[in-house]
Image (tube, coloured by chain):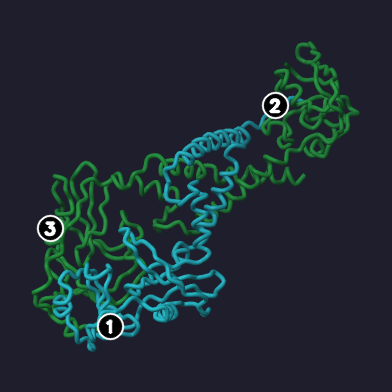
Amino acid sequence: MIRLVIANWHKWLALLVSIQLLVWLLTGLYFNSLMNSADNVPTRQPVQHEGYLPGRELYPPQAIDAPPPVAVSIIWVLGAPYYQFEYNQPSHAYFPRQRRIFDATTGEPWQIGAEQVATIARQAYSGSATAGKPALLKPPIDDLPRQQNPLWQVRFADEFNTAVYLDALTGHVIRHTNDRQRLDDLMLTLHFMDYTGTGFFNHPLIVIFAIATSLLALSGGYLLISRSGPTGKQLASPCTLTVNFLSGAESASLQARADDTLFNALSRHGIHLPSECGGAGTCGKCRLQCTPDTPVTDIEQHHLNQQQLVRGIRLGCQQQVGACQQVELPRR
Amino acid sequence: MRLVGIQFILWAITGLYMVCLDIHFIHGEPLTHPQSAPLQLKDISYSTAQLLADYPDATDIKLVTLLQKPVYRFRSAAGQRAIHVVDAITGKPQDLLSQAQASTIADDAYTGTAAINTVSPLISRDASGALNPLWVVSFDDIASSTLFIEQQSGRIIRRRHNYWYLFDWMWRLHIMDYDDGENVTNGWLRLVSLLSVLAAVSGLALLLLRFTLRKKAAL
């Protein structure tokens, strides 16, 4: 009987996760067969920022008027050196970063302007489309859901709607994206069920669906291996099964094995009883008429009412040929 | 379904593991404190100009604190190493990290309370394929937390624990790439995915039939 409870749960779990299951499979197939991220933005090209340092007079970092940082990097922007004072060391660059930039020649505070951003973006782009005006965006940024820092965005009016994202303070290129990349991102969003735009796969919705899917898969596995068959112990000897069709008043005599189920014996002769579970004892659809004294199984008790049982209605998957050698069916 | 059933269960269970455990936790980020001690800029007496006179090809220069001292960390082709560390007070180059120094760095960074279990050397390859000597410091905690420290730079470059190794196997089972888990585009996964789409579509059709065709059995 536990099997019937599990079968019922299996049905409702399937209803809950079915669409997402198909989405997982199809997006998974997409990652496997169609995604090629490295070639998404063929107009991407590296920008050469670095200049030659020896011989330059650098302002000593210890003389800069700023609270003491955790680390100081010498960075380059369009051939000029700058000090990047870092006040935190996040484990990912997309986490909030606390920094200050100073001109390494004068020691003055510095931040990149829109004009230089446009110059860098054009250098980072090998296509022929013209660059739009740089826009300084605050997170959340649609194209980069994980990003928690403000970024410059420069759009190019090409056929793929390419956009270049650059660091708000230094103008260093963070990422290129275009419609091909956005399609890949959309597939990941669907695979991760990340409809709220967290950029990750650790959120309650997918956890709930993953639990439901695990239960669905495990219950499916259980249902597949634990089929409820007949409980009788008939021998594997040959015998004759007589089938009377109520509609046309015709009948047939079939050769069968006594230990086979009626469901299987009939289907071997091309007579397919209605069924959803294929003779596993789950659906209760493969009804036929036996003699009223045919023993009743637990599964039949569950699927059939007392009136039907008294009339001799049984399930084809629960009865062996040897125990019920004459059956009646509504039509061929 | 019998063909792909096992993989369905594996996808569901491995997916469940991967979505339940926070990816930053899996990456070992909570194993170490981020460095937060302010840099002692006032102590610096060996200037960038002096550094560049000694190492004219120095790039990616960064002033950081290593073992309580301000140091320059940079890339240079000088000597037999890629990454150099030079004391920003004395200008003295830092030798490869000793075992004791690696233990100190690991202990300072480690957020847990367990003691160090072992500190062993490992020659690894970095992203560019160059040989990179490391110290592998493992802690005596429940997850066998392990920090990988570069002998040249003193940086902690990898954080591993048992949940990471388990995650790695879950990932391999999920993408059906059992050797190194790097090939999402393998043909085996493609075949099973295609069969699974067929199985899922037929399952969906059967489910819809079951919910819509509620007609009475003939008998």
Have a look at marks 3 and 2 and say if they share a chain: yes
Q: Colour of chain A?
A: green
* B186 relative to A18 in the view: left or right: left
In what element is the residue under mark 2? loop
Which residue bears the numbered disc 1? B70
The alpha-carbon separation of the residues under discs 1 and 2 comes to 81 Å
Residue type indicated by callout 3: Thr
Q: Is residue B139 visible?
A: yes
Q: Colour of chain B?
A: cyan
Image-quadrant location for residue A294 = top right
A327 vs A140: above or below: above
Disc marking residue A274: 2
Which residue bears the numbered disc 3? A119
The C terminus of chain B, quarter of image: top right
In what element is the residue under mark 1? strand
The chain identifier of the residue carrying mark 3 reads A
| Residue found at the very far bottom of the displayed protein | B43
Q: Residue at x 49, y 62 (%)?
A: B164
Disc marking residue B125: none
Residue type indicated by callout 2: Pro
The alpha-carbon separation of the residues under discs 3 and 2 comes to 72 Å
